[in-house]
Amino acid sequence: MISFFKRRRSGATPRRRDPVTAVARPVARPAAERSTAASLSIKAYTAQHVQAFFYSLGQLWCARAATLMTVVVIGIALALPTALYLVLEHAQQVGAGWKGGTQVTLFLKQEVSDEEARTLAVRLRTWPALASVRAISRTEALEEFRRLSGFGAALDALDENPLPAVLVLQLGEIEDGAGRLLEQVRALPEVELAEFDEQWLKRLHAIMAVIERAVQLLALLLAVAVLFIVGNTLRLAVQSRSDEIEVSKLIGASDAFIRRPFLYSGMWRGALGGVCAWVMVSLALWLLNGPVQQLAALYQSDFHLSGLSFTLTLWLISAGAVLGLLGAWLSVGRHLTNIEPA
Amino acid sequence: MILFNHVSKRHPGGFEALREVSFELARGEMVFLTGRSGAGKSTVLRLITLLERASFGQIVVNGQSLSGVTRRGLPKLRRSIGMVFQNHKLLHDRTVFDNVALPLVIAGLSRDDTARRVHAALDKVGLLSKERAYPVTLSGGEQQRVGIARAVVHKPLLLLADEPTGNLDPELSREVMALFQEFNQFGVSVLVATHDLELIRHLPHRTLTLKDGQLVADSATP
Protein backbone atom coordinates (compact mmCIF):
# COMPACT_ATOMS: atom_id res chain seq x y z
CA MET A 1 0.00 0.00 0.00
CA ILE A 2 1.40 3.34 -0.99
CA SER A 3 1.55 5.69 1.89
CA PHE A 4 -0.93 8.52 1.72
CA PHE A 5 1.20 11.59 1.88
CA LYS A 6 4.48 10.18 0.66
CA ARG A 7 2.91 9.59 -2.70
CA ARG A 8 1.89 13.16 -2.98
CA ARG A 9 5.32 14.49 -2.22
CA SER A 10 7.17 12.09 -4.44
CA GLY A 11 8.42 13.58 -7.66
CA ALA A 12 7.59 10.35 -9.45
CA THR A 13 3.87 11.01 -9.27
CA PRO A 14 2.76 10.51 -12.86
CA ARG A 15 0.31 13.40 -12.89
CA ARG A 16 2.82 15.84 -11.57
CA ARG A 17 3.37 18.75 -13.89
CA ASP A 18 5.03 22.12 -14.10
CA PRO A 19 7.87 21.85 -11.58
CA VAL A 20 8.26 25.63 -11.65
CA THR A 21 5.00 26.36 -9.90
CA ALA A 22 5.62 23.48 -7.56
CA VAL A 23 8.92 24.94 -6.52
CA ALA A 24 7.52 28.43 -6.31
CA ARG A 25 5.02 27.34 -3.71
CA PRO A 26 6.08 27.39 -0.10
CA VAL A 27 4.70 23.91 0.18
CA ALA A 28 5.56 21.51 -2.60
CA ARG A 29 2.20 20.45 -3.92
CA PRO A 30 1.65 19.61 -7.57
CA ALA A 31 -1.20 21.52 -9.11
CA ALA A 32 -2.88 18.48 -10.57
CA GLU A 33 -3.09 16.89 -7.17
CA ARG A 34 -5.21 19.72 -5.91
CA SER A 35 -7.71 19.29 -8.69
CA THR A 36 -10.34 17.94 -6.31
CA ALA A 37 -10.64 21.35 -4.76
CA ALA A 38 -11.02 23.11 -8.06
CA SER A 39 -14.14 23.28 -10.17
CA LEU A 40 -15.33 20.20 -11.97
CA SER A 41 -14.18 19.07 -15.36
CA ILE A 42 -16.61 17.76 -17.97
CA LYS A 43 -15.39 14.24 -17.32
CA ALA A 44 -16.08 14.60 -13.62
CA TYR A 45 -19.47 16.07 -14.41
CA THR A 46 -20.37 13.09 -16.58
CA ALA A 47 -19.08 10.73 -13.93
CA GLN A 48 -21.35 12.37 -11.40
CA HIS A 49 -24.35 12.00 -13.70
CA VAL A 50 -23.63 8.34 -14.30
CA GLN A 51 -23.19 7.89 -10.59
CA ALA A 52 -26.49 9.64 -9.77
CA PHE A 53 -28.23 7.71 -12.56
CA PHE A 54 -27.42 4.33 -11.04
CA TYR A 55 -27.46 5.48 -7.45
CA SER A 56 -31.06 6.67 -7.81
CA LEU A 57 -32.03 3.35 -9.40
CA GLY A 58 -30.42 1.54 -6.49
CA GLN A 59 -32.32 3.72 -4.05
CA LEU A 60 -35.60 2.87 -5.77
CA TRP A 61 -34.72 -0.81 -5.66
CA CYS A 62 -33.90 -0.61 -1.97
CA ALA A 63 -37.36 0.79 -1.29
CA ARG A 64 -39.18 -1.52 -3.68
CA ALA A 65 -42.54 -1.57 -1.91
CA ALA A 66 -42.79 2.21 -1.57
CA THR A 67 -41.56 2.69 -5.13
CA LEU A 68 -44.13 0.23 -6.44
CA MET A 69 -46.95 2.09 -4.74
CA THR A 70 -45.93 5.45 -6.20
CA VAL A 71 -45.39 3.90 -9.59
CA VAL A 72 -48.84 2.27 -9.59
CA VAL A 73 -50.52 5.54 -8.60
CA ILE A 74 -48.68 7.37 -11.38
CA GLY A 75 -49.55 4.48 -13.68
CA ILE A 76 -53.26 4.82 -12.99
CA ALA A 77 -53.09 8.58 -13.48
CA LEU A 78 -51.42 8.08 -16.86
CA ALA A 79 -53.54 5.08 -17.86
CA LEU A 80 -56.86 6.93 -17.56
CA PRO A 81 -56.28 9.57 -20.24
CA THR A 82 -54.50 7.00 -22.39
CA ALA A 83 -57.48 4.65 -22.24
CA LEU A 84 -59.91 7.47 -23.06
CA TYR A 85 -57.70 8.52 -25.92
CA LEU A 86 -57.85 5.00 -27.28
CA VAL A 87 -61.65 4.94 -26.97
CA LEU A 88 -61.73 8.15 -28.95
CA GLU A 89 -59.36 6.81 -31.56
CA HIS A 90 -61.50 3.72 -32.02
CA ALA A 91 -64.67 5.79 -32.20
CA GLN A 92 -63.11 7.83 -34.99
CA GLN A 93 -62.23 4.61 -36.71
CA VAL A 94 -65.87 3.51 -36.46
CA GLY A 95 -67.06 6.90 -37.73
CA ALA A 96 -64.68 6.80 -40.67
CA GLY A 97 -65.68 3.28 -41.65
CA TRP A 98 -69.41 3.88 -41.28
CA LYS A 99 -71.17 2.29 -44.24
CA GLY A 100 -74.92 2.36 -43.85
CA GLY A 101 -77.55 4.95 -43.24
CA THR A 102 -76.31 7.88 -45.30
CA GLN A 103 -78.50 9.36 -47.92
CA VAL A 104 -78.24 11.87 -50.68
CA THR A 105 -81.09 14.15 -51.68
CA LEU A 106 -81.32 15.15 -55.37
CA PHE A 107 -83.26 18.30 -56.17
CA LEU A 108 -84.14 18.12 -59.85
CA LYS A 109 -84.43 21.09 -62.13
CA GLN A 110 -87.74 22.95 -62.31
CA GLU A 111 -88.36 21.93 -65.90
CA VAL A 112 -88.01 18.21 -65.16
CA SER A 113 -91.47 16.67 -65.09
CA ASP A 114 -92.68 14.09 -62.64
CA GLU A 115 -92.61 11.54 -65.46
CA GLU A 116 -88.98 12.26 -66.27
CA ALA A 117 -88.17 12.09 -62.57
CA ARG A 118 -89.64 8.63 -62.31
CA THR A 119 -87.62 7.46 -65.36
CA LEU A 120 -84.47 8.83 -63.80
CA ALA A 121 -85.29 7.01 -60.58
CA VAL A 122 -85.66 3.76 -62.45
CA ARG A 123 -82.34 4.36 -64.16
CA LEU A 124 -80.59 5.16 -60.91
CA ARG A 125 -81.89 2.03 -59.24
CA THR A 126 -79.62 0.06 -61.55
CA TRP A 127 -76.54 1.74 -60.03
CA PRO A 128 -74.84 -0.74 -57.75
CA ALA A 129 -73.79 1.97 -55.28
CA LEU A 130 -77.36 2.82 -54.42
CA ALA A 131 -79.45 0.68 -52.11
CA SER A 132 -82.73 2.38 -52.93
CA VAL A 133 -84.11 5.39 -54.75
CA ARG A 134 -87.32 7.11 -53.71
CA ALA A 135 -88.95 9.53 -56.06
CA ILE A 136 -90.99 12.42 -54.69
CA SER A 137 -93.02 14.03 -57.48
CA ARG A 138 -93.60 17.78 -57.62
CA THR A 139 -97.20 17.27 -56.58
CA GLU A 140 -96.21 15.09 -53.68
CA ALA A 141 -93.64 17.60 -52.61
CA LEU A 142 -96.23 20.33 -52.74
CA GLU A 143 -98.64 18.25 -50.71
CA GLU A 144 -95.98 17.48 -48.15
CA PHE A 145 -94.93 21.07 -47.95
CA ARG A 146 -98.49 22.27 -47.61
CA ARG A 147 -99.09 19.74 -44.85
CA LEU A 148 -95.95 20.38 -42.89
CA SER A 149 -95.20 24.06 -43.33
CA GLY A 150 -98.55 25.69 -42.76
CA PHE A 151 -97.96 28.05 -45.69
CA GLY A 152 -100.74 26.50 -47.73
CA ALA A 153 -102.52 29.78 -48.32
CA ALA A 154 -99.38 31.41 -49.58
CA LEU A 155 -98.81 28.57 -52.04
CA ASP A 156 -102.33 28.92 -53.34
CA ALA A 157 -101.51 32.46 -54.31
CA LEU A 158 -98.82 31.21 -56.69
CA ASP A 159 -99.67 30.37 -60.27
CA GLU A 160 -97.58 27.28 -60.47
CA ASN A 161 -95.88 24.76 -58.22
CA PRO A 162 -92.54 26.22 -57.13
CA LEU A 163 -91.17 22.95 -55.82
CA PRO A 164 -88.96 20.64 -57.89
CA ALA A 165 -89.20 16.90 -58.00
CA VAL A 166 -86.91 15.21 -55.52
CA LEU A 167 -85.10 11.89 -55.52
CA VAL A 168 -83.90 10.47 -52.20
CA LEU A 169 -80.98 8.11 -52.70
CA GLN A 170 -80.10 5.62 -50.03
CA LEU A 171 -76.39 4.78 -50.25
CA GLY A 172 -75.39 1.16 -50.16
CA GLU A 173 -72.10 -0.37 -49.14
CA ILE A 174 -69.49 1.85 -50.65
CA GLU A 175 -65.97 2.17 -49.53
CA ASP A 176 -64.74 5.66 -50.14
CA GLY A 177 -67.46 6.56 -52.51
CA ALA A 178 -69.90 9.03 -50.99
CA GLY A 179 -67.90 11.91 -52.43
CA ARG A 180 -67.44 10.37 -55.85
CA LEU A 181 -71.05 9.34 -56.10
CA LEU A 182 -72.04 12.88 -55.29
CA GLU A 183 -69.95 14.09 -58.21
CA GLN A 184 -71.56 11.58 -60.53
CA VAL A 185 -75.14 12.52 -59.66
CA ARG A 186 -74.34 16.19 -59.85
CA ALA A 187 -73.19 15.61 -63.42
CA LEU A 188 -76.63 14.33 -64.39
CA PRO A 189 -78.37 16.89 -66.62
CA GLU A 190 -81.64 16.68 -64.69
CA VAL A 191 -80.07 17.48 -61.34
CA GLU A 192 -80.16 20.99 -60.00
CA LEU A 193 -78.69 20.31 -56.57
CA ALA A 194 -77.38 17.24 -54.70
CA GLU A 195 -77.17 17.39 -50.91
CA PHE A 196 -75.30 14.82 -48.89
CA ASP A 197 -77.16 14.25 -45.66
CA GLU A 198 -74.19 14.48 -43.37
CA GLN A 199 -76.16 15.46 -40.34
CA TRP A 200 -75.56 12.18 -38.68
CA LEU A 201 -71.78 12.23 -39.25
CA LYS A 202 -71.60 15.87 -38.32
CA ARG A 203 -73.25 15.14 -35.00
CA LEU A 204 -70.94 12.23 -34.39
CA HIS A 205 -67.94 14.42 -35.05
CA ALA A 206 -69.29 17.16 -32.85
CA ILE A 207 -69.78 14.71 -30.01
CA MET A 208 -66.31 13.36 -30.51
CA ALA A 209 -64.85 16.85 -30.48
CA VAL A 210 -66.49 17.39 -27.10
CA ILE A 211 -65.15 14.12 -25.78
CA GLU A 212 -61.73 14.90 -27.20
CA ARG A 213 -61.62 18.21 -25.35
CA ALA A 214 -62.78 16.49 -22.17
CA VAL A 215 -60.02 13.93 -22.54
CA GLN A 216 -57.47 16.70 -23.00
CA LEU A 217 -58.68 18.45 -19.86
CA LEU A 218 -58.62 15.22 -17.91
CA ALA A 219 -55.11 14.48 -19.16
CA LEU A 220 -54.01 17.92 -18.01
CA LEU A 221 -55.54 17.42 -14.58
CA LEU A 222 -53.97 14.01 -14.18
CA ALA A 223 -50.60 15.35 -15.35
CA VAL A 224 -50.79 17.89 -12.55
CA ALA A 225 -51.70 15.04 -10.22
CA VAL A 226 -48.56 13.18 -11.30
CA LEU A 227 -46.49 16.30 -10.57
CA PHE A 228 -47.88 16.42 -7.07
CA ILE A 229 -47.50 12.70 -6.46
CA VAL A 230 -43.83 12.78 -7.46
CA GLY A 231 -43.27 16.06 -5.66
CA ASN A 232 -44.70 14.77 -2.44
CA THR A 233 -42.85 11.48 -2.64
CA LEU A 234 -39.58 13.32 -3.13
CA ARG A 235 -40.33 15.76 -0.35
CA LEU A 236 -40.47 12.76 1.97
CA ALA A 237 -37.33 11.33 0.39
CA VAL A 238 -35.48 14.60 0.97
CA GLN A 239 -36.62 14.70 4.58
CA SER A 240 -35.58 11.13 5.24
CA ARG A 241 -32.13 11.84 3.84
CA SER A 242 -31.64 15.15 5.60
CA ASP A 243 -28.58 13.85 7.52
CA GLU A 244 -26.86 12.89 4.33
CA ILE A 245 -27.77 16.19 2.69
CA GLU A 246 -26.44 18.12 5.65
CA VAL A 247 -23.12 16.28 5.71
CA SER A 248 -22.80 16.57 1.94
CA LYS A 249 -23.34 20.30 2.13
CA LEU A 250 -20.81 20.52 4.94
CA ILE A 251 -18.09 18.93 2.89
CA GLY A 252 -18.76 20.99 -0.17
CA ALA A 253 -21.45 19.37 -2.27
CA SER A 254 -23.15 21.84 -4.56
CA ASP A 255 -26.93 22.10 -4.63
CA ALA A 256 -26.90 20.60 -8.10
CA PHE A 257 -24.94 17.60 -6.85
CA ILE A 258 -27.38 16.98 -4.03
CA ARG A 259 -30.41 17.57 -6.22
CA ARG A 260 -29.29 15.26 -8.99
CA PRO A 261 -30.11 11.82 -7.53
CA PHE A 262 -33.53 13.08 -6.51
CA LEU A 263 -34.22 14.38 -10.00
CA TYR A 264 -33.18 11.07 -11.50
CA SER A 265 -35.33 9.24 -9.00
CA GLY A 266 -38.31 11.41 -9.97
CA MET A 267 -37.62 10.65 -13.60
CA TRP A 268 -37.39 6.93 -12.92
CA ARG A 269 -40.64 6.94 -10.99
CA GLY A 270 -42.42 8.79 -13.81
CA ALA A 271 -41.02 6.52 -16.52
CA LEU A 272 -41.88 3.41 -14.52
CA GLY A 273 -45.35 4.87 -14.02
CA GLY A 274 -45.57 5.14 -17.80
CA VAL A 275 -44.60 1.50 -18.16
CA CYS A 276 -47.16 0.61 -15.52
CA ALA A 277 -49.84 2.56 -17.42
CA TRP A 278 -48.87 0.70 -20.58
CA VAL A 279 -49.32 -2.63 -18.84
CA MET A 280 -52.70 -1.60 -17.42
CA VAL A 281 -54.06 -0.30 -20.72
CA SER A 282 -52.76 -3.29 -22.67
CA LEU A 283 -54.35 -5.62 -20.15
CA ALA A 284 -57.65 -3.77 -20.39
CA LEU A 285 -57.56 -3.92 -24.19
CA TRP A 286 -56.84 -7.62 -24.08
CA LEU A 287 -59.72 -8.25 -21.70
CA LEU A 288 -62.12 -6.14 -23.78
CA ASN A 289 -61.17 -7.47 -27.19
CA GLY A 290 -63.22 -10.69 -26.96
CA PRO A 291 -66.57 -9.07 -26.10
CA VAL A 292 -65.95 -6.22 -28.55
CA GLN A 293 -65.39 -8.65 -31.38
CA GLN A 294 -68.57 -10.51 -30.48
CA LEU A 295 -70.45 -7.23 -30.58
CA ALA A 296 -68.87 -6.25 -33.87
CA ALA A 297 -69.76 -9.64 -35.33
CA LEU A 298 -73.43 -8.93 -34.59
CA TYR A 299 -73.12 -5.86 -36.82
CA GLN A 300 -71.31 -7.84 -39.51
CA SER A 301 -68.21 -5.81 -38.80
CA ASP A 302 -64.64 -6.97 -38.53
CA PHE A 303 -63.92 -4.16 -36.10
CA HIS A 304 -61.35 -5.05 -33.44
CA LEU A 305 -59.40 -3.22 -30.76
CA SER A 306 -55.89 -2.42 -31.83
CA GLY A 307 -53.23 -2.29 -29.13
CA LEU A 308 -51.03 0.63 -28.14
CA SER A 309 -48.85 1.66 -31.02
CA PHE A 310 -45.11 1.96 -30.58
CA THR A 311 -45.30 5.73 -30.90
CA LEU A 312 -48.01 5.96 -28.28
CA THR A 313 -46.04 3.72 -25.94
CA LEU A 314 -42.99 5.90 -26.39
CA TRP A 315 -45.13 8.96 -25.75
CA LEU A 316 -46.59 7.45 -22.62
CA ILE A 317 -43.25 6.54 -21.08
CA SER A 318 -41.54 9.80 -21.97
CA ALA A 319 -44.53 11.80 -20.72
CA GLY A 320 -44.18 9.93 -17.43
CA ALA A 321 -40.45 10.60 -17.29
CA VAL A 322 -40.83 14.29 -18.06
CA LEU A 323 -43.62 14.73 -15.53
CA GLY A 324 -41.59 12.87 -12.91
CA LEU A 325 -38.55 15.02 -13.56
CA LEU A 326 -40.60 18.19 -13.45
CA GLY A 327 -42.36 17.17 -10.25
CA ALA A 328 -39.01 16.37 -8.67
CA TRP A 329 -37.56 19.67 -9.84
CA LEU A 330 -40.43 21.69 -8.40
CA SER A 331 -40.34 19.91 -5.07
CA VAL A 332 -36.69 19.10 -4.35
CA GLY A 333 -35.18 22.49 -5.00
CA ARG A 334 -37.48 24.11 -2.46
CA HIS A 335 -37.01 21.51 0.23
CA LEU A 336 -33.24 21.25 -0.19
CA THR A 337 -32.68 24.88 0.64
CA ASN A 338 -34.44 24.30 3.94
CA ILE A 339 -31.78 21.84 5.01
CA GLU A 340 -28.68 23.74 6.02
CA PRO A 341 -25.89 22.39 8.17
CA ALA A 342 -26.12 23.78 11.68
CA MET B 1 -3.89 30.69 5.03
CA ILE B 2 -6.41 32.19 7.41
CA LEU B 3 -6.65 35.86 8.25
CA PHE B 4 -9.09 37.32 10.77
CA ASN B 5 -9.17 41.09 10.74
CA HIS B 6 -11.21 42.64 13.60
CA VAL B 7 -13.93 40.08 13.22
CA SER B 8 -17.09 40.29 15.32
CA LYS B 9 -20.08 38.05 15.27
CA ARG B 10 -23.32 39.19 16.78
CA HIS B 11 -26.25 36.82 16.84
CA PRO B 12 -29.78 38.00 16.34
CA GLY B 13 -30.91 38.92 19.82
CA GLY B 14 -27.70 40.76 20.65
CA PHE B 15 -25.47 37.97 21.94
CA GLU B 16 -21.93 38.72 20.83
CA ALA B 17 -20.15 35.45 20.08
CA LEU B 18 -16.93 37.08 18.87
CA ARG B 19 -15.54 40.53 19.54
CA GLU B 20 -12.82 42.13 17.45
CA VAL B 21 -10.89 38.93 16.86
CA SER B 22 -7.73 39.26 14.77
CA PHE B 23 -5.16 36.60 14.01
CA GLU B 24 -3.31 35.06 11.14
CA LEU B 25 -2.53 31.44 10.43
CA ALA B 26 0.35 31.03 8.02
CA ARG B 27 0.42 28.41 5.30
CA GLY B 28 1.67 25.12 6.69
CA GLU B 29 1.19 26.22 10.28
CA MET B 30 -0.55 24.21 13.00
CA VAL B 31 -2.46 26.19 15.61
CA PHE B 32 -4.58 25.27 18.61
CA LEU B 33 -7.62 27.32 19.44
CA THR B 34 -8.57 26.99 23.07
CA GLY B 35 -10.95 28.42 25.58
CA ARG B 36 -13.86 27.31 27.69
CA SER B 37 -17.08 26.11 26.18
CA GLY B 38 -18.93 29.07 24.74
CA ALA B 39 -15.80 31.19 24.37
CA GLY B 40 -16.29 31.30 20.60
CA LYS B 41 -14.05 28.50 19.31
CA SER B 42 -16.79 26.88 17.27
CA THR B 43 -17.90 30.26 15.98
CA VAL B 44 -14.42 30.86 14.56
CA LEU B 45 -14.56 27.55 12.69
CA ARG B 46 -18.12 28.17 11.56
CA LEU B 47 -17.12 31.54 10.16
CA ILE B 48 -14.22 30.01 8.23
CA THR B 49 -16.50 27.43 6.58
CA LEU B 50 -19.24 30.02 6.09
CA LEU B 51 -21.75 28.15 8.17
CA GLU B 52 -22.21 31.63 9.55
CA ARG B 53 -21.17 34.99 8.24
CA ALA B 54 -19.29 37.58 10.24
CA SER B 55 -21.18 40.66 11.39
CA PHE B 56 -18.13 42.89 11.17
CA GLY B 57 -14.55 42.56 10.02
CA GLN B 58 -12.79 40.70 7.29
CA ILE B 59 -11.92 37.02 6.93
CA VAL B 60 -9.57 35.74 4.25
CA VAL B 61 -9.16 32.02 3.64
CA ASN B 62 -6.54 30.80 1.20
CA GLY B 63 -6.30 34.23 -0.36
CA GLN B 64 -10.04 34.58 -0.81
CA SER B 65 -12.09 37.12 1.08
CA LEU B 66 -15.14 35.34 2.46
CA SER B 67 -17.40 38.35 2.05
CA GLY B 68 -17.03 37.80 -1.70
CA VAL B 69 -18.13 34.17 -1.58
CA THR B 70 -21.70 33.79 -2.78
CA ARG B 71 -24.05 30.94 -2.06
CA ARG B 72 -23.01 29.40 -5.34
CA GLY B 73 -19.34 29.69 -4.53
CA LEU B 74 -19.77 28.17 -1.11
CA PRO B 75 -19.34 24.50 -2.08
CA LYS B 76 -16.03 25.26 -3.76
CA LEU B 77 -14.74 26.95 -0.61
CA ARG B 78 -15.78 24.00 1.53
CA ARG B 79 -14.19 21.55 -0.87
CA SER B 80 -10.85 23.23 -0.30
CA ILE B 81 -11.14 22.65 3.45
CA GLY B 82 -11.10 19.41 5.39
CA MET B 83 -13.33 19.33 8.45
CA VAL B 84 -13.32 17.06 11.47
CA PHE B 85 -16.29 17.19 13.82
CA GLN B 86 -16.66 16.27 17.46
CA ASN B 87 -19.63 14.03 16.67
CA HIS B 88 -17.94 12.70 13.51
CA LYS B 89 -20.97 13.37 11.29
CA LEU B 90 -20.65 10.03 9.54
CA LEU B 91 -23.45 8.54 7.46
CA HIS B 92 -24.60 5.45 9.27
CA ASP B 93 -26.23 3.76 6.34
CA ARG B 94 -22.96 3.65 4.44
CA THR B 95 -19.79 1.69 4.85
CA VAL B 96 -16.56 3.23 6.07
CA PHE B 97 -15.28 3.19 2.51
CA ASP B 98 -18.33 5.06 1.19
CA ASN B 99 -18.12 7.61 3.99
CA VAL B 100 -14.51 8.40 3.27
CA ALA B 101 -15.17 8.41 -0.48
CA LEU B 102 -17.90 11.07 -0.21
CA PRO B 103 -15.67 14.14 -0.82
CA LEU B 104 -14.15 12.42 -3.87
CA VAL B 105 -17.56 11.47 -5.20
CA ILE B 106 -18.59 15.09 -4.81
CA ALA B 107 -15.47 16.11 -6.69
CA GLY B 108 -16.37 13.64 -9.43
CA LEU B 109 -13.26 11.47 -9.28
CA SER B 110 -13.16 8.23 -11.24
CA ARG B 111 -13.81 4.95 -9.45
CA ASP B 112 -10.19 3.88 -9.60
CA ASP B 113 -8.81 7.15 -8.31
CA THR B 114 -11.41 7.20 -5.58
CA ALA B 115 -10.60 3.67 -4.44
CA ARG B 116 -6.87 4.40 -4.51
CA ARG B 117 -7.17 7.56 -2.45
CA VAL B 118 -9.70 6.15 0.01
CA HIS B 119 -7.43 3.19 0.64
CA ALA B 120 -4.46 5.46 1.15
CA ALA B 121 -6.40 7.64 3.61
CA LEU B 122 -7.76 4.68 5.53
CA ASP B 123 -4.30 3.18 5.62
CA LYS B 124 -3.01 6.41 7.06
CA VAL B 125 -5.47 6.34 9.97
CA GLY B 126 -4.99 2.60 10.41
CA LEU B 127 -8.47 1.49 9.44
CA LEU B 128 -7.87 -0.18 6.10
CA SER B 129 -9.20 -3.46 7.43
CA LYS B 130 -12.50 -1.85 8.39
CA GLU B 131 -13.41 -0.40 5.00
CA ARG B 132 -16.45 -2.61 4.63
CA ALA B 133 -17.69 -2.06 8.17
CA TYR B 134 -20.54 0.27 9.07
CA PRO B 135 -19.73 3.18 11.40
CA VAL B 136 -21.99 1.91 14.20
CA THR B 137 -19.85 -1.19 14.56
CA LEU B 138 -16.76 0.95 15.27
CA SER B 139 -15.58 2.41 18.54
CA GLY B 140 -15.67 6.16 19.16
CA GLY B 141 -11.96 6.50 18.42
CA GLU B 142 -12.29 4.53 15.21
CA GLN B 143 -15.26 6.60 14.10
CA GLN B 144 -13.25 9.75 14.71
CA ARG B 145 -10.42 8.36 12.63
CA VAL B 146 -12.88 7.61 9.82
CA GLY B 147 -13.95 11.24 10.12
CA ILE B 148 -10.32 12.33 9.84
CA ALA B 149 -9.74 10.11 6.83
CA ARG B 150 -12.76 11.72 5.17
CA ALA B 151 -11.42 15.18 6.01
CA VAL B 152 -8.06 14.59 4.33
CA VAL B 153 -8.95 12.21 1.52
CA HIS B 154 -9.35 15.03 -1.00
CA LYS B 155 -6.06 16.59 0.15
CA PRO B 156 -7.28 19.93 1.37
CA LEU B 157 -4.88 22.80 2.01
CA LEU B 158 -6.53 23.50 5.32
CA LEU B 159 -7.72 21.11 7.98
CA LEU B 160 -10.15 22.30 10.63
CA ALA B 161 -11.06 20.24 13.67
CA ASP B 162 -13.76 21.11 16.18
CA GLU B 163 -13.12 19.33 19.50
CA PRO B 164 -11.83 16.25 17.70
CA THR B 165 -10.89 14.60 20.99
CA GLY B 166 -13.97 15.65 22.90
CA ASN B 167 -15.28 12.13 23.30
CA LEU B 168 -11.99 10.27 23.44
CA ASP B 169 -9.84 9.03 26.30
CA PRO B 170 -6.35 10.59 26.71
CA GLU B 171 -4.61 7.76 24.94
CA LEU B 172 -6.79 8.01 21.82
CA SER B 173 -6.67 11.79 22.00
CA ARG B 174 -2.90 11.73 21.79
CA GLU B 175 -3.08 9.42 18.78
CA VAL B 176 -5.50 11.76 17.03
CA MET B 177 -3.29 14.78 17.72
CA ALA B 178 -0.29 12.84 16.42
CA LEU B 179 -2.22 12.27 13.20
CA PHE B 180 -2.89 15.97 12.84
CA GLN B 181 0.78 16.71 13.45
CA GLU B 182 1.70 14.22 10.79
CA PHE B 183 -0.59 15.86 8.24
CA ASN B 184 0.86 19.22 9.23
CA GLN B 185 4.37 17.95 8.58
CA PHE B 186 3.32 17.29 5.03
CA GLY B 187 2.26 20.86 4.48
CA VAL B 188 -1.38 20.98 5.50
CA SER B 189 -2.37 24.00 7.58
CA VAL B 190 -4.18 22.78 10.66
CA LEU B 191 -6.48 24.61 13.08
CA VAL B 192 -7.69 22.55 16.02
CA ALA B 193 -10.29 23.89 18.43
CA THR B 194 -10.02 22.12 21.76
CA HIS B 195 -10.60 22.77 25.43
CA ASP B 196 -8.25 19.96 26.42
CA LEU B 197 -5.35 22.09 27.70
CA GLU B 198 -3.71 19.10 29.33
CA LEU B 199 -3.44 17.42 25.95
CA ILE B 200 -1.84 20.30 24.07
CA ARG B 201 0.37 21.60 26.86
CA HIS B 202 3.38 19.64 25.69
CA LEU B 203 2.78 20.03 21.98
CA PRO B 204 5.09 22.52 20.27
CA HIS B 205 2.41 24.51 18.46
CA ARG B 206 1.07 28.00 18.66
CA THR B 207 -2.02 28.39 20.83
CA LEU B 208 -4.74 31.00 20.56
CA THR B 209 -6.92 31.48 23.62
CA LEU B 210 -10.43 32.85 23.44
CA LYS B 211 -12.40 34.13 26.37
CA ASP B 212 -15.94 35.44 26.12
CA GLY B 213 -15.54 36.00 22.40
CA GLN B 214 -12.26 37.86 22.67
CA LEU B 215 -8.77 36.74 21.80
CA VAL B 216 -6.93 36.99 25.15
CA ALA B 217 -3.70 35.16 24.44
CA ASP B 218 -1.50 34.17 21.52
CA SER B 219 1.47 32.01 22.43
CA ALA B 220 3.38 33.36 19.41
CA THR B 221 3.29 36.91 20.78
CA PRO B 222 3.64 36.67 24.51
Image: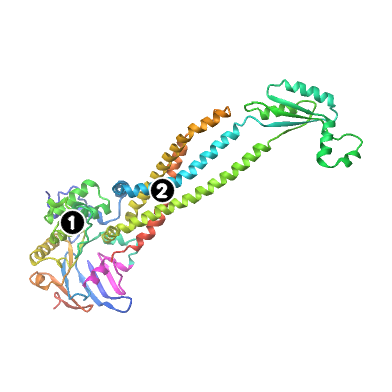
Q: Are marks 2 and 1 on the same chain?
A: no
Highlighted range, magenta:
B41-67
Q: Which mark is residue A286?
A: none
Front residue of this view, candidates A237 and B15 = A237
Q: Is residue A119 above or below residue B67?
A: above
Residue A143: tell me if it is visible. yes
Q: Judging from the image, what secondary structure is the residue with disc 1 in?
A: helix
Looking at the rendered image, the quarter that the C terminus of chain B falls into is bottom left
Q: What chain does badge 2 belong to?
A: A
Colour setting: rainbow
The quarter of the displayed image where residue A115 is located = top right
The answer to whether marks 2 and 1 mark residues whose Cβ atoms lie closer than 8 Å is: no
Front residue of this view, candidates A147 and B197 = A147
Q: What chain does badge 1 belong to?
A: B
The quarter of the displayed image where residue A171 is located = top right
Residue A206 location, x and y as percent? 63, 42
Q: Is residue A239 left or right of residue A201?
A: left
Asked whether residue B62 is drawn in magenta, I would say: yes
* Residue wearing tag 2: A73
Q: Is residue A86 above or below residue A10?
A: above
Looking at the rendered image, the quarter that the N terminus of chain B falls into is bottom left
Q: Is residue A97 left or right of residue A140?
A: left
Q: Judging from the image, what secondary structure is the residue with disc 2 in?
A: helix
* Residue wearing tag 1: B135
Which is closer to the viewer, label 2 or label 1? Answer: 2
Front residue of this view, candidates A15 and B178 = B178
User: Which amino acid type is shown beneath numbered disc 2?
Assistant: Val
Question: Dot 2, crowdedness within 10 Å: few (<14), some or many (≥20)?
Answer: some
At 62% from the left edge and 27% from the top edge, which residue is drawn?
Answer: A175
